Amino acid sequence: MTKAVVIVNPSSGREEGKTFGPKVQMELEKLYDEVEMKWTEKEGDATRFAREATRQEVDAIYALGGDGTVNECVNGIATEEKRPPFGFIPLGTVNDLGRVLGIPMESEKAVEQLTKRRKKAIDIGKINDTFFVDIVAIGSIPEAVHSVPVEEKTNLGPFAYILEGLKALSEKEAYPFKFDIEGEITEVDSFLVIIALTNSVAGIPTVLPHASEEDGVLHLLAVRGENVAPKINLVPKVFSGKVSEDDEVFYRKFKEADISLTDEKKYKTVVTNVDGDEGDYLPIKLKVFKQYLEVFVPDIDE
Ligand SMILES: Nc1ncnc2c1ncn2[C@@H]1O[C@H](COP(=O)(O)OP(=O)(O)OP(=O)(O)O)[C@@H](O)[C@H]1O
């Protein structure tokens, strides 16, 4: 007797969960004896459902939702010793992990692919006590993202973040970061720090061309500079992946790191963005868990 649990956030993206939920159920019933649908109502539901299902030792957990829902489900699974494979249909605006794994962005196609799949073990990261699957971002650009209205996100997709970020650049200053990367201390003034697991940032697959979802390291990129305005020309370079050529960018890969500020009084003012949603304030501890989670990806050879 095999069982899968499907966690649906009906509010994600363009609210397609309601339409696609039953289609996903029908498709997965070809693979599992029982498919249980769980509909989220509020923050925390997806984590709770995923943890309950993991403890029941179900054969697979699936999510239908945006990056926030995927993050919540992974947080429910990752704390447990025996972890079922995880699949998802991206319904949000950015869907970095979905892009990296080759999951179709068109929900109809992604549903069709559900039965033509293989498993792949991917890295996940941890910031303080929370797991993440994609990215931690800190600075003026990610802070601006927190104020992007939901409608703008839904209509413009990833560009909403970039537009909002560029607006913020003219007004904001950099923060005095202190990176403790496996014992090496570096102080960098920066308005944008990205810690990524994959090569896709804000839906753009070229930002960290050498990063891969299974390389067992976190990739940190910080744009150097005290004042934001003179650095504005660096942003297109960052987003076209030409970052390593520039002395004005600090880049390291690592397994564990602490990020704080040289000025402790500013700690409570600098908040992180974790997989697209607001996360902890600085200081933070980061760690990677190599090939820790099995995910379903489309099997293109089949
Ligand atoms: N039934 C619900 N109604 C409203 N909000 C919900 C419901 N269920 C869960 N939520 C909240 O919705 C949040 C955002 O969901 P999610 O990230 O999946 O969609 P999104 O914001 O449209 O996508 P993206 O993050 O890619 O932009 C979740 O973190 C959760 O707190």
Image (spheres, helix red, strand yellow):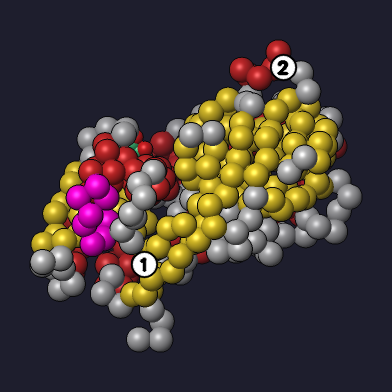
Quarter holding the C terminus is bottom left
Q: Is residue 138 above or below residue 114?
A: above
Q: Secondary structure at mark 1?
A: strand
Crowding at dot 1, Cα within 10 Å, few <14 / some 14-19 / many 20+, comes out as many
Disc 1 from disc 2: Cα separation: 42 Å
Ligand 1 in which quarter: top left
> Observer-nearest residue: 263 or 172?
263
Identify the residue position indicated by label 2 in the image.
Answer: 264
Q: Is residue 209 above or below residue 229?
A: below
* Residue at image point 77% right, 31% down: 178
Residue 107 in the image, given as x and y percentages of width and height: 32, 63
Q: Is residue 87 left or right of residue 246?
A: left
Q: What segment carries the magenta color?
A: 54-62
* Mark 2 residue CB less than 8 A from any atom of ligand 1: no
Identify the residue position indicated by label 1 in the image.
Answer: 296
Residue farthest toward the top in the current orientation of the protein: 265
Q: Is residue 258 above or below residue 3?
A: above
Residue 99 in the image, given as x and y percentages of width and height: 48, 63
Question: Are dots 1 and 2 in contact, CB under 8 Å?
Answer: no
> Observer-nearest residue: 254 or 16?
254
Residue farthest toward the front in the current orientation of the protein: 81
Q: Is residue 67 above or below residue 209?
A: above
Residue 266's disc is none
Give the mark nearest the N terminus, 1 or 2. 2
Q: Is residue 268 left or right of residue 175?
A: left
